[in-house]
Image: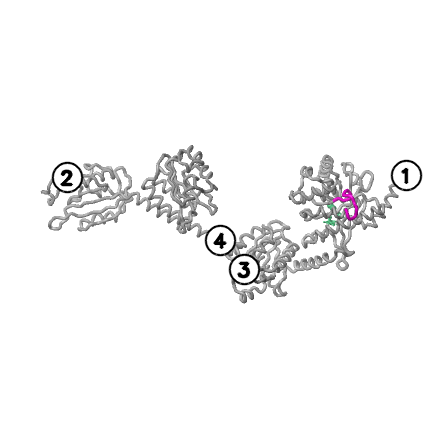
Amino acid sequence: MDFPLNDEEKGKPLEELRLLGLAVDATNRGVLILDEDRRIIYTNRAFTDLFGYARDEVAGKRPSEFLPGTNTDATTFERLRRGAWDNQVVHGDTLLYSKSGREIWVSASVSPIKDNDGAVTNLVIVLVDITETKQIQNLQRIVLEAVASGLPLRGVADLICRQVETISPEVYSSMLLVDDEGRLHPLAGPRLPKEYSASLDGLRIGANVGSCGTAAYLAKTVVVTDIDTDPLWENHKSAVLPLGFQACWSSPIKMRDSRVAGTFAFYYKEKRGPSALHMELVSACLHLSMLAIETDDARHKIAQLSHFDSLTGLPNRQSLYDKAADLLPVEQGKETAFFALDLDRFKDINDTLGHSIGDRILIEAAYRLQKLTHPRSIVSRTEGDVFMIVVPDCNVSRASALADHILEELRAPINVSGLSLSTSASIGISIAQEQMAPEIFAEQAVSAMQQAKLAGRACYYFYNPEQNQIAKDRLILGNALRSAFGTESINLVYQPKVRLKNLELVGVEALSRWNDALLGEIAPGKFIPLAEEIGQIEAIGYWSLREACRQMALWRGEGVAVPNVSVNLSPLHFLNRSLTAFIEGVLAEFQLSASCLTIEITEGVMVGQNQESLATAMALHDIGVALSIDDFGTGFSSLSRLAKLPVKELKLDDSFVRNIEEDPNAQAVATAVISIGHSLGITIVSEGVETEKQAGLLERLGCEVAQGFLFGKPMRAHELEAYLMHRETRLSRDAD
Ligand code: C2E
Ligand code: MG
Ligand code: MG
């Protein structure tokens, strides 16, 4: 060996020097020795291995001539170069370049060798390859910067995987999240086939669910060096083996509280386990992943806090405004109601019973308000004891009904810490009928709420005075309607339905009339919807059924030939299972057969295909009561659907009849309804027939039965008797 000797070493036993040379050559650190002129006089084997230069290629050169390159930090390099000549040992990390141009990070230490006079004669440079460590540090820096800059979790996960794969191209990395129910969800896996990642979505973790499912379940690293034979992959290997993956090493991502939030895995295309570098990479990445997930969780919590009220979980004011903008009327005729609701004397509760009881009341109020409102409505808590509710498709009348319900619901006692407390609220309502910022309607509602407070609390006020008037009228009307039952002011009138070809009476339709002593005659078009809103419609229905049957029984007894009576019922009745039993009871009470009675319902009842409604319709059919679909053509039901329902009669809406002479569309609809009705064995009744021409045309189109002013207006029972007598004499005279 040609190990160079300085003056001091000359004379040492040769064996000792040989051993020394061997030792230097055997180390994995690159060693360079420079002479006084800073030229290389010695390099060891490790240097050649690391940098690719043979000893002869560099002998006599200065390191600065070939080791630094484009990305070498000049300052560090210069410090190392100069330092030792200043008689001290210098250390530093620097980036150098191999013969092939590969970047190599080294930790360098440069030591001076001095002669007897203390002058530096040689330098010994030791270079340790720290490229991998530097790469990992670099990865950490890049990922931390990304986390700090607010990159979403998915982006950070993707970045981690890509960085790892750049450092170790033989690795196919994957990151999965584990949800609270123990299901896996793919987060990143840039080099895994998308379909494979997607197939893992929702997979439940378990004791032998591949590498990741098991690692998450056991909260332990799982190394599978041969997917094909490992029992952990028994049920899952068919998805990965065809992709060429043979091994998979997965580690749980644990949070500070030891909860497993995800997994980080390396797939390999050969049967193997992780290398030392892989272990270092994973250890760094698990920590980074934990930080990324933690930051993401925190971000979600902040977002939650900024949009939701933490006590009740309801949206806060800002969130309400954001959401309300979507509910505002975009088309003419649609109205959206804004309710501002302030709990009455809430301050007293807080002051006397304490804040924790106050909080319980707020939570309960929030719960009750949500329960009362339609799912599309927004219930929010905007401050202290103020709630704001936005209800789409809500006019003055509906808003009044909802306000009544809210007041009633809040009155029900709340049990808190052994106390039974009841509360009330002052409510202000603004009805949005045009497009304006939600804030404006909210302010109007608050100002109406102040009025409600001034008016003595536990009541509601509309912002718009006209709307207040409508609400007041509605209140008066509602109260009058409640007390009208059982009095003479509500009664039934009957309108004949006749067979067009011979004007034979096929039945009568019972229609409600309300003639209030103070308010005068109120049209059913007004009081029926009101009765629906104030919860009186079922009572009206039961009353009409009983009254119509009572009248039928009277006619039967007196020999008046009315074959059938139709009663209008609202869709609500059909949701009530007891309707059939009620009808059976009434028929029995008046000893009538079911064939005397027809129930008219609007298309809507059947269109929704609500199971309850269908069951009621079937039950009525089973006891022999006929069903008639009223106002047909105004809803959305299709004739084909009717074929499946137990329908006996269809009433063609008067809007088609009115225009039948001049409007070809109306005539086309009438023709279609009549012919399909025939084919289904359903009787078609034309409503609102007022002229001979209409009647003639309808008859020619094949319509058998008609109802309308032409044949008779709705009339009181005794008027109908007179009408029938008069008609009989007329018909028999015509026959003569
Ligand atoms: P409907 O069941 O379609 O009743 C037919 C309506 O058309 C009745 O109006 C009747 O008076 C009117 N009408 C009949 N022939 C003619 C005509 O030739 N020309 C015109 N212009 N109109 C005619 P009414 O009595 O005002 O009832 C309106 C609606 O109120 C009814 O429509 C029905 O849906 C509902 N209704 C009436 N009474 C009750 C009831 O007791 N319960 C329920 N749930 N609804 C009822
Ligand atoms: Mg009707
Ligand atoms: Mg009708």
In the rendered view of the protein, which quadrant contains the N terminus? top left
The location of residue 530, given as percent across then percent down, is 69, 54
C-alpha gap between disc 1 and disc 3:
84 Å
The amino acid type of the residue labelled 4 equals Gln
Label 2: how many residues lie within 10 Å, few (<14), some (14-19) or many (20+)?
some
Residue at the spot of label 4? 304
Q: Nearer the viewer, mark 2 or mark 1?
A: 2
Is residue 614 toward the left or the right of residue 31 in the image?
A: right
C-alpha gap between disc 1 and disc 4:
87 Å
Residue 595 on the magenta span = yes
Q: Nearer the viewer, mark 2 or mark 4?
A: 2
Q: Residue 18 shows which numbered tag?
A: 2
Query: What residue is drawn where x is 54% and y is 67%?
Result: 352
The amino acid type of the residue labelled 3 equals Arg
Q: Nearer the viewer, mark 1 or mark 3?
A: 3
Mark 2 or 1 closer to N-term?
2
Is residue 421 toward the left or the right of residue 548 in the image?
A: left
Mark 2 or 4 closer to N-term?
2
Mark 1 or 4 closer to N-term?
4
Is residue 197 toward the left or the right of residue 476 in the image?
A: left
Label 1: how many residues lie within 10 Å, few (<14), some (14-19) or many (20+)?
few
Q: Give the camera-side residue of 477 and 241.
A: 241
The amino acid type of the residue labelled 1 equals Asp
C-alpha gap between disc 2 and disc 1:
149 Å
Residue at the spot of label 3? 360
Is residue 709 toward the left or the right of residue 78 in the image?
A: right
Q: Nearer the viewer, mark 1 or mark 4?
A: 4
Mark 2–mark 4 CB contact (< 8 Å): no
The location of residue 297, given as percent across then percent down, is 44, 50
Q: How is the image coloured?
A: one colour
